Amino acid sequence: MADLKEARVPDIGGFDDVPVIEVLVAVGDTVSADQGLVTLESDKATMEVPAPFAGVIRELMVKVGDTLSEGGVVAIIEAEGGEVRAEAPAPRTDPVAKTSDAPAAAKAPAAKASPSGGALQESKVPDIGGYDDVPVIEVLVAVGDTVEKDQGLITLESDKATMEVPAAVAGIIKALKVKVGDTLSEGGVVAIIEAAGDAPVAAPVAAPAAVKGTDDNTVEPVAPQARPDRIAEASIEHRVPGSGAPPVRFDAEAILPDKVPYASPAVRLFARELGVDLLQLKGSARGGRIVREDVQSFVKGVMQGGGAKAAAGAPATAGGGLNLLPWPKVDFAKFGEVEVQELGRIQKISAANLARNWAMIPHVTQHDDADITDLEALRVQLNKENEKAGIKLTMLAFLIKASVAVLKQYPRFNSSLDAAGETLTLKKYFHIGFAADTPNGLVVPVIRDADKKGVLEISQEMSALAKKARDGKLGPADMQGGCFSISSLGGIGGTSFTPIVNAPEVAILGVSKSAMKPVWDGKAFQPRLILPLSLSYDHRVIDGAAAARFTATLAQLLGDMRRVLL
């Protein structure tokens, strides 16, 4: 019998009705212990609720917009192997947001006075679960700023949470002890504040942790601080409380932080990887929250030439919103004679698509060699036999046929990733595109159902499509539905190159000029015709080992096309 267990919200500091801003799993998903289930966001922190044990999600009890309190049921999980972790509190392995007052010293030393008469107060990092070296991603204040008690001073971000460190007292910032890129641990000094009026001051933390990357964190001990009234707190325990009401199901307005972009840690990381400044984006989710799709739309708008204005309604920036240097403006005519040519329509469309694909897809290229000595002899023989029929076989026709056979063995290469990067569509058909160089620019006609055609039929269809491309008569249907593309430069030259993946495909094969090379057969070097292969692939879908197997298998088939029949 299945062992079903409730996954509940752990201690979140006694606060109720914290909004759910993201649901990270779906029914049927297999989760590991401590994997995030949902993301909650208060006014001071974004935090994930982890799975207390490994298993399969059988029912989700919440949706985006619901609110949760401690003990609220998030999901029903069928425990892996029928074993469930005990419900006793245990230290959590993920650093998440927790802000609480540090233990006060038994006897607080007197506060250090400033020249203006106010008490100087160390504002330190509160309890963040015992984890060290959490990066500072934003500094929210400057020296001389007047701050309120509990106002955010800096933002820390771990792999599970984004959190603000609040001011211990109201007053004036006299010194900042950290900068962006430093790392902080519990008790690390963030700032020195000259307390305003009769504001209480805090006792020093017993053993303040050093701040990596700063020069001076040594400040004389100061007097005790009263506990802040409203500071977001997320526990580091993954205990599952034995009791607690199910989540209240009503819409709650999301709370937008004042000084930081409104986005979850996962979205922040995704934006940083693409070089996107979240301050330039307008979130599409409730309350203006920025989601992954907003970042992708922003980049797409920039790559298509619309700039930042075209992306989520954000204002344009000199670097296109991608933290890039502005494009250099040069008066070339002052250096000599020039001629200005307008790009053609196809070139403009291709340029935008290629720029988007290069920016959005993490490319890796795998290189290999194929011995096509016997295959070239077969091609020459078949061309002689079909000379009267006017059929001329090219090596590309064999490459298409061999590629289809390899795609059947490695179906992930015959797939497409959705815009959110969360689902993969595996295709059961085999439509192969081939790059055709025309006077008007590069186009990619598609051979449909290549698995059902022989090399002679493929060659005839390629010839007809190439002629239409040169004459500018290719229709949209001739270039749609491709699963995998081949770019052959064998008739021109070169030894290898890095073709750009033709989204939404996940791989493209580049072929360079074949050349005779000496190959050791165990007894002597033999002259063999070697064809260089260059396979570019989307590393989000395909790993290096799979790519190496793909090119090795393709090279083997090209070395002996009889294997295609197997």
Image (cartoon, rainbow, N blue to C red):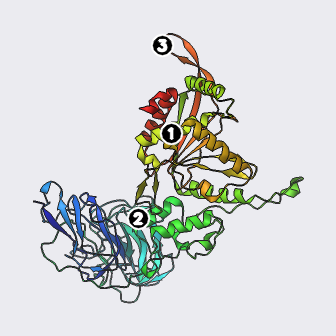
Compute the Cα span from label 1 to label 3: 29 Å
The residue at the far front in this view is 388
Q: What amino acid type is highlighted by mark number 2?
A: Ala
Residue at image x 31%, y 83%?
230
Q: Earlier in the sequence, mark 2 or mark 3?
A: 2
Q: Secondary structure at mark 3?
A: loop
Instruction: Give the quadrant of the N terminus.
Output: bottom left
Question: Is disc 3 surrounded by few (<14), some (14 to 19) or many (20+) residues within 10 Å?
Answer: few
Q: Secondary structure at mark 1?
A: helix
- On the image, the x and y values in percent for residue 388 come to 69, 30
Instruction: Give the quadrant of the C terminus.
Output: top left
Q: Which residue does the numbered mark 3 point to in the structure image?
A: 522
Question: Between tags 2 and 3, which lies in front?
Answer: 3
The residue at the far right in this view is 337
Name the quadrant containing residue 46: bottom left
- On the image, the x and y values in percent for residue 322 come to 58, 64
Q: Which residue does the numbered mark 2 point to in the structure image?
A: 266
Q: What amino acid type is highlighted by mark number 3?
A: Gly
Q: Earlier in the sequence, mark 1 or mark 2?
A: 2
